[in-house]
Image: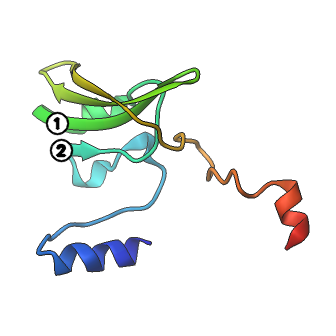
Amino acid sequence: MIARAEQLLARAGYEVELRCGDGQHGWAEHAPYDRVIAWCSVADVQAALLDQTIPGAVLVLPMRAGEHQWIARYSRAEDRLIEEARLPGSFIPLTPVPFRPWATEQVARRV
């Protein structure tokens, strides 16, 4: 998936470096960032996102609280994040192990 995304972005004229991995700790090796877009929902904003962004940075994060989910746009102040917008939406949760809801016992027995 990453290779295909890099190929399509390069074809569109974007020079980016993508990473597929555990997003709970950010990507410190390339920090600081002025933009962050997350693809997994979180109950709380990870401390690494504050530590690895610069003041003025924009963060777009899928958030969740119980059964409720939304997509939030934050701006990074000197010492905190400020929620500026909230839209309906949902994503898979950020988990410490791969989230594969389709890999149930029932599905595994059919394979």
Left or right, 20 with respect to 35, comes to right
Q: How many marks?
A: 2
Left or right, 111 with respect to 90, comes to right
- Where residue 25 sits in the image (x, y, percent)? 41, 42
**Identity of the residue drawn at 25% across and 66% down:** 17
Q: Secondary structure at mark 1?
A: strand
Q: What residue would you read off at disc 1?
A: 58
Residue type (three-letter) at the residue carrying disc 1: Val
Observer-nearest of 24 and 100: 100
* Mark 2 surroundings: few (<14), some (14-19) or many (≥20) residues within 10 A: some
Instruction: Classify 13 as above or below 67.
Output: below
- Where residue 11 sits in the image (x, y, percent)? 18, 81
**Identity of the residue drawn at 14% across and 70% down:** 14
* Rendering colour mode: rainbow
Q: Looking at the image, is mark 1 or mark 2 earlier in the sequence?
A: 2
- Where residue 31 sits in the image (x, y, percent)? 21, 48
Q: What residue would you read off at disc 2?
A: 35
- Where residue 85 sits in the image (x, y, percent)? 22, 24
Quadrant location of the N terminus? bottom left
**Identity of the residue drawn at 24% across and 31% down:** 73
Check whether the beta carbons of the residues at disc 1 and disc 2 lie within 8 A of each other.
yes
